[in-house]
Image (cartoon, rainbow, N blue to C red):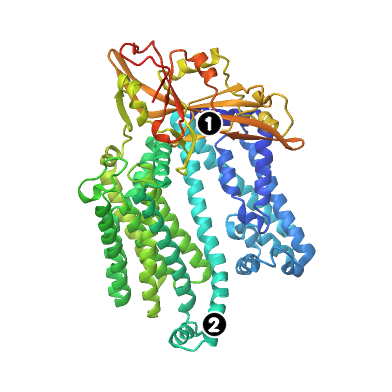
Amino acid sequence: MSEFIHAIVQFAEMHAALVYGLAFLVACLESVAVVGVLIPGSGIIVAFGTLVPSGAVGFWWLCFWSILGALAGDGLSYWVGHRYHGRLRRLWPLRRHPEVLAHGERFFAAHGGKSVFLSRFVPPVRGTVPLVAGMTGMAPGRFFTSSSLSAFGWAPSHILPGALIGAGLTLTGLVAARLLVFVVVLAAVLWLVVRVTVLTLRHGGRLLTLAQKRVERWARSHPGWVARQLLALLEPSRGEARALALLGLLLGLAAWTFFSVLEDVVSGEPLVDADTAIYNMLQGLRSLVADRVMIAITELGSATVAGAVVAVVALWLIWRRAWHAAAYWVAAVGGASLIGLVIKVALHRPRPAPVSAGWDAFSFPSGHATTSAAIYGFLAILLARDARPAWQAVIAATAALVVALIGFSRLYLGAHWFSDVIGGVAFGTAWIALLAIAYVRHNPPQLPAVPLAVILVGTITAVGSFQVAHTMSADLDRYAVRQTGQTMTAAAWWRDGWREIPSRRIDLAGEREEPLVLQWAGGRDDLERRLTAAGWRLPTPWSMATAVSWLSQTEDPLTLPVLPRLHDGHPAALTLIHAGSGDHPNGRWVLRVWKSETRLTAPGSKPQALWVGAITQQRIRQALAPFGLGFERSPAAPPWALLEQALPNARRAIWADSGTGAEVMLARDPAFWSLSRGFPRARYSS
């Protein structure tokens, strides 16, 4: 990880102009209507700010190019609006997405000239307000004055936090690498959750409207009780039809997801292998700073905080005499928790690490994920039922964000598998959607959303702060990183213990990829020394020049860098290449070696890691001149001679239960153990 971050910083130092150019581009595109919605420009500018403390980029230069890009984007949008006026409504893509322009017009009408300054800090209208300003004939001098002031405030407000993060990371060495990658992964997950939620609400409404019209036409042409009920439900005077349709769609998707995950867990499908890969990847990102943050978030889904929220909201609903809402609220949370516990006890699936005892020691589904989905999902329904569409999107995205954070914290802390969290969220969502359909069907009275939101935030803040302060030290021990994997003697491994090692690489999706044809008992550095002495070589490191070389014709494939691959969530600890055979002159062998979860012991020696390796054959083809593409596949027969030359004391064994006669090479370092006595000397064994 530290080498990876160092490579990023080194790359930025060598290509600072590229960083400045990208800062200009993303700041510009984020200010363009429709396009700006798809560009996470603010997050990218913050990420660039983390490079400032290392000296890779200059603070003032980064500010300059970000401000210039923001002004260019504003100016482009303003010119387009001033040039085409109302004709823009008839042009693509605004013709397909009229709501984008409508949001900007409402914001401009509400704030007047100040909207140009304010919109820079409001992502949904950042690209449309300059367009509207040009369409309405706002004076150019007034527009560019407001735009300049907003750009000069926006750029430093994003670069400075990034610089502070970068300064903290620079001081912590290896922790810096893990923390930075952790922040990137978390930001990507949360951004994806929010985008999917907003896009689902935006486009789901249009699809539901079309479906509603088709159902209505069918009901009017078919007599009967079902048709009469559908027509009564779709009556325009009844406002809950759209909400019921959306809840029905949510119920179907959530239920399908839950039962699909449950089937994979019970039958041991590839999702179970993906669980281990994702667990290992996240455990490799652990750091004390991130641990404290994730523990604070996971405590927001604890029984103490959840119980306080349930009790306070129930008392408030009773005080408002909202009897139906109070009953459904208790049923939503209590039912989800109880049924989830029954499923958990019935399956008896163990957790990744023993962080709980009793009935809670079992894993599927995650109690935190199930309860948080039920609590914040039903609260979102109560708050958003009578809100405006814009606020409904904000409420839904906020609820999804909270549930995603709590679920991610369980994954990061190693308390649950990925399938546990996905299954828990899906089950909790399906349960509250089912109850919400019955609740909305009875057309309950309107509830004041603002007092409920204030009570909710106050309760979570007060109880959550107390809970985090009270349990932080104990939770740091409870969720500490634990050594995983198995230990066996070197003699047992050499005899037949090698069969317990996975025979294929497992990617993050849980799919079994190319065979693991090498098992090495010894040090990584010694393996690298032996292989390089036999003709293997380290690949060319990644840089801008070597990345571009993939797009140009090259006579020597050994000069191209190698794409990384994960095994069981771990990056390759060693990657080596070797020239291909005479049959494939424009190709190469690629050997990737990973540290396995198995440790070997021998008398008089410290426990040593067992390393596993996979070999692929990569051929470079000129698909479309002058562009080159690399096709990587598992060879029919690995280059055993190249390995035997480097590892003369190795032996090859056959996976007898694979059905294909696949082989694996077992190799050991004699400097660590004297393993020859009593071991089979045959070249092959099954």
Q: Residue at x 55, y 74 (%)?
A: 211
Measured as percent of width and height from the top left, residue 365 is found at 32, 53
**Hey, what amino acid is under mark 1?**
Ile
> On the image, numbered disc 2 is attached to which residue?
218
Q: Is residue 329 visible?
A: yes
Residue at the far right in the pictured view: 83
Answer with the quarter of the image where residue 616 lies: top right
**Hey, what amino acid is under mark 2?**
Trp
Q: Are marks 2 and 1 in contact (CB under 8 Å)?
A: no
Q: Nearer the viewer, mark 2 or mark 1?
A: 2
Q: Can you tell which mark lies on residue 5?
A: 1
Q: Residue at x 28, y 61 (%)?
A: 339
Measured as percent of width and height from the top left, residue 258 is found at 39, 58
Residue at the far left in the pictured view: 358
Q: Is residue 13 above or below residue 201?
A: above
Residue nearest the observer in this picture, 195 or 19: 195
Q: Is residue 243 above or below residue 595?
A: below
